Every structure is written in structure tokens, then in C-alpha cells.
Amino acid sequence: MKFIKNFNNNAALVSDESGVDWVVIGNGIGFGKKPNDPIDETKITRRFVAVEKNIKMIDSVRDIDKRTLSLTTDVINLVSKRLSVNFTDYQYLVLADHIDFMLKRTDEGFELGQGTVGWELKKLFPKEYSAAKDALKLLQEKTKLTFPNSEVVYLTYHFINASSDQTKLQDTIKITKLIHGVIEIIEYQYGMQLDPESFNFNRFMTHLRSFMVRHLYEIGDEDSGSELDNSLLELMKVKYKKAYETVLKIGTYLSKQAGWKLQPDDEVYLTLHVWRVTHRQKDGTDSEAKQIPADEK
């Protein structure tokens, strides 16, 4: 690979033998280099195809130092294994930017507000929240700094975001707040606390996130519900009456908060998920809700 230009000493634009341009990151990768100089490829810790989005992002984080890049790689190695997720190039750069700002804030004694309180995220996304706590512990051990607990919240958002390469961080925050509202409606309607460790709860979270991403980016909405057998929805209304009534309240909430309208197929799947997540069900290791409403036994 041949050197083209520096973003900083640890990030450079290079070209390979095929003429493809890359953004490469590594300790001192561009130090003292001139155009067309060969680079030491053993120093490369991360590489990105030089598309416009990555170029702009690198440009915005040009002051990130080698310590931050190393810490970001350590965090991603830890989290990727724990959560079975792969960080995209863009998500790597965004996380590096966040960790760099986090180090500077801590050095200056400045703490951001949590935005969403930690217990909400811990309940909705326990695996990501737990990974964020471990990542913060790793960062503290590596840097000998003491970070405020609020940083766990922001790291959790990054890890939730890594599970879907379609969403941006601000959209992940919006989706998380909407999901929290949906869970509050269900718990209020049924007078119970849902078990975030249960299989059905985690399956419901996956469905809700997928549902919200579709609506947020208007993916596959044009024909939504067009092939649904109307008798299926009518069956849901009768067989799972309370669950369906709860879904109608969820629909009102989402309409007010996000301007989304539930389609018939949305109502069917949400009704089934609401019923499952609020009922005791054993599948070998899983025991569902804390209680079962009398009208749906």
C-alpha cells in the first residue's frame, strides 16, 4: 500500500495495488510519510474502504490519539464476543469518538446527564447494559481513571446500535425510549413486572426493535397487511381480548409519539407477543410472567 495523505499520525489515506483507496488506522501509520511512500502494513489495526461517509467521519475525529484507538479496539473485542455482534466501520469510528470525548470529559471533571436513567436500559437491554458495565471497568483498568456511572448508559446505546447496521445512534436512543413506553403500557395494563431475563421478553424486544426500525426507515410499509387474512385478526380480538386491547393502547401511544400507524399484521404479531410475554410459559429453562390475569387463563 502507498501513502496518499495523513488525517493524523495514526490515521491515513492509502492506495492498494488495485488502485482502491483505504483509510487505515494504526500507531504512527502516517508519521513522516510522503505521497507514494510505502506504509508498514503490520501497523494497521483497522482499515475502511475510503467511501465519502468514512472520510468525513475520519476528518471529524482527526485529533483522536493512539491511546483512544487502542482502547476502542479492546472494548470492541470484549463486546463483540459477549454480544455476538460486529461493529461496522462507521460504528467503530463513532465509538472511538465517544471514548475520546469520554476521556477528555473525565480529565476535566465534566459529567453528562444520563438522558434515560440506567435502570430503564438495564431492564430493556440487560445483556448490552451488562457488557457496557464490563467495558467501563476495562477502560478504568487500562486508563487508571474513574468514570461516572452515567457513562454506562452511553456505552449501552452504542452496543445496542451495533446490533443493527441500519440505525444511527440518535435513532437507537429514540427507539429505546419508545420501547420503554410500550413496556410501561403492558405492565400497567396487566399489573405486573415483566421478566427481562425471560426468553419471551427477549424475543419481544427483538420483534419491537425490528418493528420500529421498519417504521422509522419506512422499510416494506407499502403493502403492509395487504395479504393478511382478516379472520386471523378477528380471532386475535376474541381469543386474546386483553392483549389486543393493550395493543390498541400501544398503537395510540406510537401514533402520538412517532406518528406511526399500526397495520393489521402489526396488530396480530404484537397481540401474540403481548400474550406470550405476560403469561407463564415453560420451555425447559424459562418461566414467564410473575402472574396471569384471570380473564386470560
Image: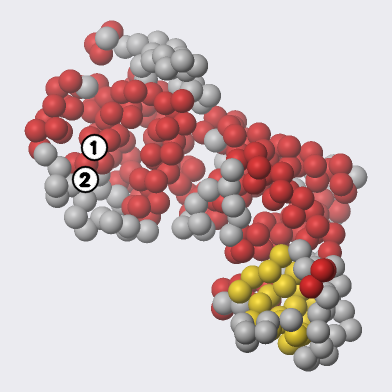
> Label 2's element?
loop
Q: Residue at x 37, y 20 (%)?
A: 278
Residue in the picture at 27% in, 30% down: 271
Residue 289 visible at all: no
Do the numbered discs 2 and 1 sit on residues whose CB atoms are within 8 Å? yes
Within-10-Å neighbours for mark 1: few <14, some 14–19, many 20+: many
Mark 2 Cα within 10 Å, few/some/many (few <14, many 20+)? some
Kindly identify which residue carries mark 1.
Answer: 267
The number of numbered discs placed on residues in the rendered structure image is: 2
User: What residue is rendered at 52% in x and 33% in y?
Assistant: 124
Residue nearest the viewer, comparing 176 with 271: 271
Which label is found at residue 263? 2
Three-letter code for the amino acid on which mark 1 is drawn:
Glu
**Circle 2: residue type:** Gln
Name the spot of residue 196 as percent of width and height, x first: 51, 26
Q: Nearer the viewer, residue 247 or 43?
A: 43
Split into 4 quadrants, where in the image is the C terminus? top left
